[in-house]
Amino acid sequence: MFFTDFTSNDLMFLLNGAWVTMQLTFWSIILGSFAGLFFGLLRALLPRASLPLAWVLDVFRSVPLLIQFVLFNSLKSIVGLNISAFSVGCIVLGVYAAAYFTEIVRAGVLAVPFTVRRASRSLGLSFLQDLRWIVLPMATRVAFPGWLNLVLGVMKDTALVMWIGIVELLRASQTIVTRIQEPLLVLCIAGLIYYVMSLVVARLGARLERRWQEND
């Protein structure tokens, strides 16, 4: 017979951790998407002028995320910023996502053929109209798969916020393992929850891509 000390309360504790993971993912992706869109357009349209920005973003892409969490959390205490650990997690993950999304947007914009842009300008569209009605819609379809992979990656990277005291899904599972000493069962359940959340995001993204193809 199979006996376990894992209870329904433990499952609810894991689901609460999963909810924190989803909130961290949502807010960090919102921040990273808006910042990355702005920075990506700058990198694509003004490559020389935005070169210092590229160097700064390279730092966030190169330094391991765990180090960024620890450093920013320590800096918060040194400077005296009165913000929660959850806010620290969202900011660090958001900047990290923005650093990667910048390159995704830049690649999407540069993928739009120059002849298409020249044709739109010859039809009388202004620079901003060309950017809004021609470049961004075409670049979005190119950049969307990369953005979707970034969302899934950030969702898994939220596990690192446990180092600054946030009880998300992985931290919740470790707490339960410490109490009942059944790591295989608990981690399998946590992994299944991660899989379900990722599957939902991936399926929604695939459905959106299919609708785009149907409207072509």
Image (tube, grey):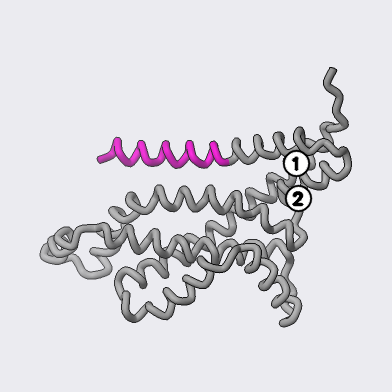
Looking at the magenta stretch, what is its main secondary structure? helix
Amino acid type, callout 1: Leu
Is residue 207 located in the magenta-colored stretch of the structure?
A: yes
Amino acid under disc 2 = Arg
Taking the spot 52% from the left edge, 61% from the top edge, the residue there is 97
216 displayed left or right of 123: right
Residue 171: give its label.
2
In this view, the residue in front, 42 or 160, is 160
- In primary-sequence order, the first of circles 1 and 2 is 1
Q: Which residues are magenta?
A: 198-216
> Residue 199: image x %, image y %?
54, 37
Dividing the image into 4 quarters, which one contains the N terminus?
A: top right
Disc ID at residue 109: none
Residue 184 drawn at (x, y percent): 75, 35
Q: Is residue 196 left or right of residue 212?
A: right
Which x, y percent locates residue 214? 29, 35
